[in-house]
Image (spheres, grey):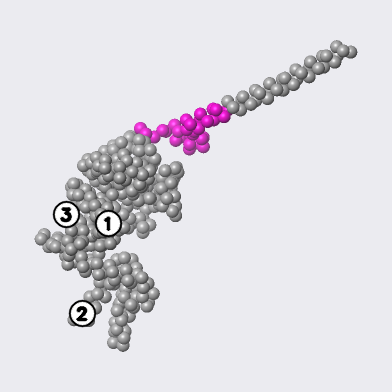
C-alpha cells in the first residue's frame, strides 16, 4: 500500500510540475525512466530525483509539495464536487478542474488559498466576483455556477472551458491575421456589451482573460476586478488606486478616477486588438510604472506602421479605441460594433472616421508639426515679446543717432 501511495504521489508531482512549466513532458519522461532504473538499487522519490538532475530547485520542489497538499485537502472539503487536477493559478486564487457530482459534468473551481482567507478584503472581493459573474448570462462569457465556503475554503464554481487563452497564442509568438483577430474581438465586444448592459465594467480585459474553445467560441473570463457603475461606495474606496493590468490598462484607471465606465473596457480591448495584429503590446518597458506612464503620456505608434499589411480602417479603429481621453473613444460598445462589423464586411468604419481628424493626420504624415492651442498661445506670446524687444532696441538706436546729429549740428554752428 505504501508503494502504491508513493507511486500516486510521484504521478501527481510530475503532472503538476509540467502544468506549472517547471519541466517539459520529455524531461519528466526521462526522469521517470531514470527512477525506474534506480528502483532496485536505491529507490528515490521523483521529487528528489528531479532536484538531483537539476530540473527543479529545492524551493520549487517545496512549493510543488505544498500545492499538491492543498489540492488533496480541497478535494475532501468542497461538498458535491470532486477535484481532478490543477488548471492554473493567479495572483489570488488557484483554479482546479473538477466534476460536479450531481450533474456529472466537468467544471472549473476557483479556490481562495488559506493564506488569503484571513484578509476580509480578499474574501469580499472573491465573493463580489462570484456575484458579478452570476448576473451575466451570455454565450461569450464564462458562466457562474456556484459560490460558497466549506472547511475554511472559499470556492467559486464556473463553466469549464476546454481550450486555451488568447495569451497562450500570443506568448508563442503568433501574430493574428486581420480577419482572425476581428472574429475574436467582435465576440469579446458582444460579451462586454452584455456586461455593460447589466451595469458592470470588467476593468481587466486582456489576453489572459479571453478563452477560446476548440470550436472557435470565445469567452470572456475573470470578473475579479469587475465593478458596478452604480457602486459609489466602492468607487470612493478605490479612488486614486490603479486597478488593472499595466500592458492593457486605460489611462483613467491608472489615475484612479472614480467615474470608470465601459470606455475603459474599450481601451483594454483595443490594447488587446493591437497586440494581436502587431505581435507586441502597445507600450513596452521593463518597469510596470513606466508602462503606465507611457499609456498616459506617450503617443501610440499606429498599428499599421508596425504591420504594413494591416488595413487603414482597422488601424483607425484601434487608435480610436485606445484614445487617451475617454471622450475621444467610442461612446459605447454598440457604436464600436458598428465599425467592427463594417471592417469584417470590408467596408469603411464610419464611426472612427467621424472622430479622425483627417486634415491633421495628413499634415503629420507630411512632416508638419501640429501644435495644441496652448502651444500656439505660448508661441504667440513669445513672438509678441520678441517684437517688443526689437522695438526697444530700434528706439535706443534711433535715440543715439538723433543725439549724434544734434551734437554734430552744434559743433558746426560754433565754427
What's the distance in space between the residues labelled 3 and 2, CA to CA? 35 Å
- The location of residue 404, given as percent across then percent down, is 78, 19
Highlighted magenta segment, given as a residue range: 354-383
Assess disc 3: are there few (<14), some (14-19) or many (≥20) residues with their C-alpha within 10 Å of its C-alpha: some
Q: Nearer the viewer, residue 80 or 258?
A: 258
Assess disc 2: are there few (<14), some (14-19) or many (≥20) residues with their C-alpha within 10 Å of its C-alpha: few
| Among the two numbered marks 3 and 2 on one chain, the one whose residue lies closer to the N terminus | 2
Q: Residue at x 82, y 17 (%)?
A: 408
- State the residue position of label 2: 4
| Among the two numbered marks 1 and 2 on one chain, the one whose residue lies closer to the N terminus | 2
- State the residue position of label 3: 145
What's the distance in space between the residues labelled 1 and 2, CA to CA? 39 Å
Q: Disc 1 vs disc 3: which is toward the camera?
A: 1
Residue 160 versus residue 386 in the image, above or below: below
Query: Which of the numbered marks, if any, corresponds to residue 119?
Result: 1
Marks 1/2 in contact by CB < 8 Å: the verdict is no
Query: In which quadrant will I find the N terminus?
Result: bottom left
Amino acid at each position: 500500500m505504501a508503494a502504491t501511495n508513493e507511486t500516486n504521489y510521484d504521478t501527481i508531482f510530475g503532472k503538476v510540475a509540467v502544468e506549472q512549466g517547471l519541466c517539459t513532458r520529455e524531461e519528466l519522461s526521462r526522469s521517470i525512466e531514470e527512477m525506474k532504473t534506480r528502483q532496485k538499487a536505491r529507490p528515490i522519490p521523483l521529487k528528489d530525483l528531479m532536484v538531483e538532475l537539476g530540473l527543479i530547485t529545492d524551493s520549487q520542489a517545496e512549493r510543488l509539495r505544498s500545492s499538491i497538499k492543498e489540492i488533496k485537502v480541497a478535494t475532501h472539503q468542497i461538498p458535491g464536487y470532486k477535484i481532478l487536477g490543477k488548471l492554473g493559478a493567479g495572483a489570488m486564487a488557484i483554479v482546479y478542474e473538477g466534476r460536479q457530482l450531481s450533474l456529472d459534468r466537468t467544471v472549473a473551481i476557483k479556490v481562495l488559498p488559506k493564506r488569503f482567507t484571513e484578509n476580509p478584503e480578499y474574501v469580499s472581493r472573491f465573493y463580489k466576483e462570484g456575484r458579478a459573474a452570476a448576473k451575466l448570462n451570455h454565450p461569450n462569457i464564462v458562466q457562474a455556477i456556484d459560490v460558497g465556503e466549506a472547511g475554511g475554503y472559499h470556492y467559486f464554481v464556473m463553466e469549464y472551458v476546454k481550450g486555451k487563452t488568447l495569451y497562450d497564442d500570443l506568448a508563442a509568438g503568433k501574430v493574428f491575421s486581420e480577419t482572425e483577430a476581428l472574429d475574436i474581438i467582435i465576440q469579446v465586444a458582444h460579451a462586454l456589451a452584455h456586461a455593460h448592459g447589466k451595469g458592470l465594467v470588467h476593468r481587466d480585459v486582456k489576453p489572459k482573460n479571453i478563452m477560446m474553445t476548440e470550436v472557435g467560441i470565445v469567452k470572456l473570463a475573470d470578473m475579479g476586478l469587475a465593478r458596478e457603475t452604480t457602486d459609489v461606495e466602492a468607487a470612493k474606496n478605490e479612488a486614486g488606486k490603479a486597478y488593472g493590468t499595466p500592458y492593457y490598462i486605460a489611462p483613467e484607471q491608472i489615475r484612479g478616477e472614480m467615474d470608470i465606465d465601459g470606455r475603459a473596457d474599450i481601451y483594454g480591448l483595443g490594447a488587446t486588438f493591437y497586440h494581436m495584429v502587431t505581435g507586441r503590446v502597445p507600450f513596452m518597458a521593463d518597469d510596470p510604472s513606466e508602462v503606465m506612464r507611457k499609456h498616459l503620456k506617450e503617443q501610440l505608434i499606429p498599428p499599421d506602421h508596425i504591420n504594413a499589411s494591416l488595413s487603414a480602417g482597422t488601424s483607425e479603429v484601434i487608435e480610436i479605441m485606445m484614445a487617451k481621453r475617454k471622450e475621444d473613444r467610442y461612446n459605447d460598445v454598440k457604436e464600436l460594433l458598428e465599425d467592427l462589423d463594417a471592417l469584417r464586411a470590408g467596408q469603411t468604419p464610419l464611426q472612427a472616421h467621424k472622430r479622425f481628424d483627417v486634415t491633421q493626420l495628413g499634415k503629420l504624415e507630411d512632416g508638419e508639426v501640429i501644435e495644441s492651442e496652448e502651444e500656439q498661445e505660448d508661441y504667440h506670446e513669445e513672438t509678441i515679446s520678441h517684437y517688443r524687444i526689437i522695438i526697444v532696441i530700434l528706439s535706443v538706436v534711433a535715440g543715439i543717432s538723433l543725439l549724434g546729429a544734434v551734437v554734430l549740428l552744434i559743433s558746426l554752428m560754433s565754427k
